Amino acid sequence: MRSLGARLDTCLSLINGERCITDVGTDHGRLPVYALKQGRTERAVAVDISEKSLRKATLLAEKEGVTITAVVCDGLTAVKQEDAPLVIIAGMGGREIVKIIEEAPFPLERAIFVPHTHAAVLRAYLRDRDVRIERDITVREGDHYYPVLLVDFRLPWRETDNIYVGGEGEARVAYIEMRLGKIEEYLTYTDDPALKEEKEILQSVYRS
């Protein structure tokens, strides 16, 4: 089966034996469709605010010989709790993901998040609510780095984790090196204590 790219391939690898997944912001629906094709889930719900995107997702499902449930809504607002034992959001910023969690009509159990921006904001939100990040994998796709987070809302935060970088992934070291270089550049014209804290933590992780 063809690759879906580093982000979605990593998401797929974290879906195993689910009774149902809900993919929020599904766009063309590739993730739920291929999760069904690979037998990683029994059912899949594709959610998007765009009816046009959902039509594409439905057509892809028909082409690949699987069936998805399409739901037009913002975030999880029209999703049934029983359809969302595993929620996937892989295409938004960390702030938008936090907003979806906050506005969800039910408490989340487990999730896979791929924040394209503001990953530290999302991690800090989970830390402050004592939520466990089970896996935090750094991947590279093209010229960009992305964290893929497997989250369990039923378990407590681990004090060994931090909000700036995950603990695994082939692209992890390269990301830390890139980010430290940018922080050094930023600190030439700002005295931001948050950047200094991030630099200190990343250096500590890099040396370990």
Image (cartoon, rainbow, N blue to C red):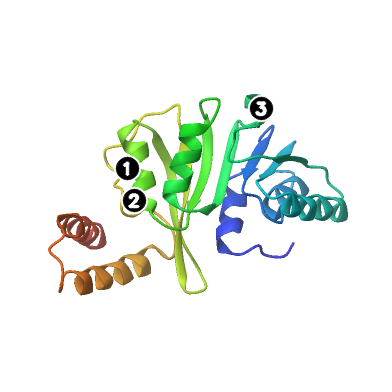
Is residue 17 at least partly visible in the picture? no
Of residue 160 and residue 201, the one placed in the foreground of this image is: 201
Residue 80's tag is 3
Place of residue 85 in the rendered image (x, y in percent of width and height, measured from the top left): 60, 30
Is any atom of residue 104 visible in this view? Answer: yes
Q: Quadrant of the N terminus?
A: bottom right
The residue beneath circle 2 is: 120
In which quadrant is the C terminus drawn? bottom left
Q: Amino acid at mark 1?
A: Ala
Which class describes the residues within 10 Å of circle 1: few (<14), some (14-19), or many (20+)? some
> Disc 1 versus disc 2: distance between alpha carbons?
6 Å
**Residue placed at 30% from the left, 67% from the top?**
179
Task: Give the amino acid at mark 2.
Answer: Ala
At x 30% / y 34%, what residue is drawn?
Answer: 128
- Residue behind mark 1: 124
Identified at 58% across, 40% down, the residue is 75
Looking at the image, which is closer to me, 149 or 82? Answer: 82
| Residue type, numbered disc 3 | Lys
Residue sitting at the far left: 191
Q: Secondary structure at mark 2?
A: helix
SS of the residue under disc 1: helix
